[in-house]
Amino acid sequence: MEPIILVCVIVLILFSLLLLLLTRYKKCPSDKIMVIYGQVGQNKDGTNRSAKCIHGGAAFVLPVIQAYEFLDLTPISISVDLKNALSRQNIRIDVPSRFTVGISTEPGIMQNAAERLLGLKLTEIQELSRDIIFGQLRLIIATMDIEEINADRDKFLEAVSRNVESELKKIGLRLINVNVTDITDESGYIASLGKEAAAKAINDAKKSVAEQDRDGSIGEANANMTERVQVSEANSRAIEGENAAKMAIAMSNASLREKEAEALRIATTAEKIQAAKALEEAYAAEQEAETARSAREKATLEADVIIGAEIEKRKIELAAEAEAEQIRRKAKGDADAIYAKMAAEAKGMEEILTRQAAGFEKIVAAAGGDANAALKLMIADKLEDLMRVQVDAIKNIKIDKVTVWDGGNGKDGKSSTANFLSGLMQSVPPLQEVFDMAGMELPEILGKKKEELTAPVQEEIPDEVQEPVAPEAEE
């Protein structure tokens, strides 16, 4: 673990040193001067440098032994209201002005700014600059007359710029602009000079106007004379020119008419020829177009008839094919359904018969293997159902009213009514006959067959038997 811890400590130290180096690499903005002070090297004469100034770019500031600050290059506006400044004529004047200064970026002057302005606030720099400007401005006014200051303003501003800027450079500043607004004095000397200059200018202007008026009148008369002479000469030459021009115009018009007539003849002939050719070509084109149109209409009619017949034929074929396909599918479906139904019925019948055979086998086994006894057991089990069948044969016969007319033609002592009822009862098949129709013999346990009816019917039945029926029944 110790080597790992040692490696981690070394890496942490190197990373911290790298961060420290990166944080000490400082960049200087374009509107500032970076001043590095501390141990920054030596001058050529072997003395230690007080500071290192950088405008733009970047530099590495050594930790502990070096530090840095910025000087702002923003222009500084200073209002200088100079009052009672004594001129060379011993006249006191007021010179209100505004100076714009800023820290210089020249190498030597930047060094002065670093030595004298670093750490000062903006107001302090303004006050320092104002004091220097006041002194130099008074000095310049003292060496100049009022006429020079007022009349030759450029000379005055040039002297101010030269003297003030030379002093500002000593503290690291440079003069950017000077603006002198208005110069006044207490005695009114400048105002008098202005009035004198104004009066002189007015008089000079009046004299110049009078002279110009005189020269204008003379010049106007000479101009009128010259104009009349030149106009007459010009009119004479103009008349001659006009006559010559008219002759030339007449000749030109005649030649023009001749050429126009010839051109009209040629054009008329060419137009008629071209019109005839055009009519000929138009007739030929119309004939070709009519031929093509008739051929196209014929082809269109033939195509309509043939295509219509083909379409109708195809429709019939498609309908027949669709109907045949539908019939085939329906027949196949019906055949499949019938086959499935018959297969299901056969399977059901097979299942019923199989189960019946199994049941019969069990009944015979229960009867001790005697088939006759087994048959008797089955009949005994179904006897009630057999009797119900016989009863149901006449059960549902609705006899609303029975009217029997007895004519007295009875035989064997029986009336017609008795014979009617006897025949009605005999219409129900006896149990013996049911067995006979089934091909079987009635078991002895159910009785034996009577050969004939021995006991006649003794009961007398009235001539008319009426049975109450429902109100809706008919006779």
Image (spheres, grey):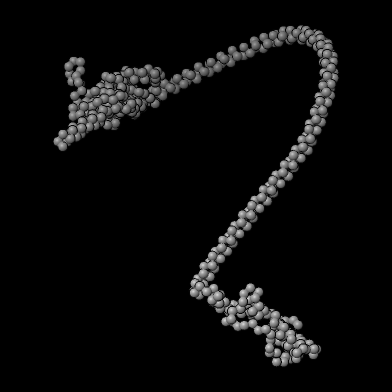
Residue 249 location, quadrant = top right
Q: Residue at x 37, y 17 (%)?
A: 155
* Foreground of the two, 154 or 91: 154
Q: Quadrant of the N terminus?
A: top left
Q: Is residue 301 visible?
A: yes
Q: Position of residue 53 (x, y in %)?
A: 26, 23
| Image position of 338 with respect to 206: above or below | below
Classify residue 166 as left or right of residue 375: left
Q: Residue at x 53, y 16 (%)?
A: 207
Q: Residue at x 29, y 32 (%)?
A: 123
* Foreground of the two, 434 or 211: 434
Tag count:
0
Q: Position of residue 161 (x, y in %)?
A: 34, 20
Q: Is residue 81 visible?
A: no
* Foreground of the two, 103 or 409: 409
* Foreground of the two, 400 or 470: 400
Q: Residue at x 54, y 67 (%)?
A: 357
Q: Position of residue 381 (x, y in %)?
A: 55, 77
